Image (cartoon, helix red, strand yellow):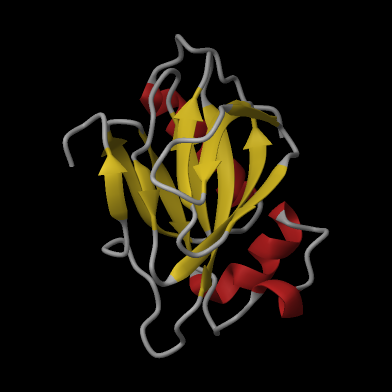
């Protein structure tokens, strides 16, 4: 699906387009947050993780990506010229597919930010547990499908499992 991702497009319109697409694809949104200063996200019902993985990660086998019984499917919406925090996680790895638009990504095994990589629609990237990473909006809105590989079945990752090394928004 091609979205209108012009940098001048209002956030509400971008979120409406994505919500409509997800509804048309029969995905159930269990949480939506468009209040993030960098954009926002849609959380998809965990019962639809298999269908989500099939749609957005068609080259991956579930047996290869599912460490626990949970994948936490999500759509990230990254605003033009905004950056998520430089961060890492203790209890998850992350897998992203750039679904629409382009985004920038920096990764590193250390606290020093790596080089900016521009990822275009259809590109796939995986960050290991503990790998530092940052998602960056470029000249237009970027839409990223995300699944988490929970690495601890007794203590699955959540939004609290974020170690921020730098954040433009003081979080």
Please tell me in which quadrant of the rendered image residue 143 appears: top right
- Viewer-side residue, 47 vs 26: 47
* Residue extending furthest toward the left: 170
Q: Is residue 145 above or below residue 9?
A: below
Q: Residue at x 75, y 39 (%)?
A: 122
Q: Name above or below for residue 101 compared with residue 58.
A: above
Q: Nearer the viewer, residue 4 or 89?
A: 89
Across and down, in percent, residue 100 comes to: 65, 32
Where does the C terminus fall, quadrant-wise? top left
Q: Which quadrant would residue 79 be assigned to in this image?
A: top left
The single residue placed furthest to the top in the displayed view is 8
Figure quadrant of the N terminus: top right
Residue 125 relative to residue 152: left or right: right
Q: Residue at x 44, y 48 (%)?
A: 110
Count the labels in the image: 0
Can you give x and y, in whole percent of width and height, for residue 38 in the image? 34, 31
Residue beneath the point at 38% across and 24% down: 82
Nearest the viewer among 94 and 19 is 94
Residue at the limit of the structure toward the bottom, as seen here = 154
Q: Is residue 38 left or right of residue 9?
A: left
> Where residue 144 sits: x, y (%)?
57, 42
Nearer to us in this view, 102 or 46 = 102
Q: Position of residue 46 (x, y in %)?
A: 51, 72
65 vs 130: above or below: below
Q: Residue at x 75, y 63 (%)?
A: 54
């Amino acid at each position: 699906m091609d979205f209108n991702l012009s940098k001048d497009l209002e956030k509400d319109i971008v979120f409406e387009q994505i919500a409509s697409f997800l509804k048309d694809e029969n995905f159930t949104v269990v949480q939506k947050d468009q209040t993030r200063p960098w954009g926002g996200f849609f959380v998809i019902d965990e019962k639809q993780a298999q269908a989500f993985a099939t749609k957005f990660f068609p080259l991956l086998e579930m047996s290869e990506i599912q460490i626990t019984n949970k994948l936490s499917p999500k759509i990230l919406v990254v605003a033009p010229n905004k950056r998520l925090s430089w961060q890492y996680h203790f209890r998850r790895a992350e897998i992203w597919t750039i679904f629409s638009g382009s985004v920038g990504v920096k990764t590193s095994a250390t606290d020093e930010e790596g080089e900016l990589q521009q990822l275009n629609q259809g590109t796939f990237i995986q960050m290991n547990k503990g790998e530092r990473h940052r998602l960056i909006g470029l000249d237009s809105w970027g839409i990223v499908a995300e699944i988490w590989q929970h690495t601890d079945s007794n203590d699955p990752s959540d939004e609290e499992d974020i170690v921020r090394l730098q954040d433009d928004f003081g979080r």
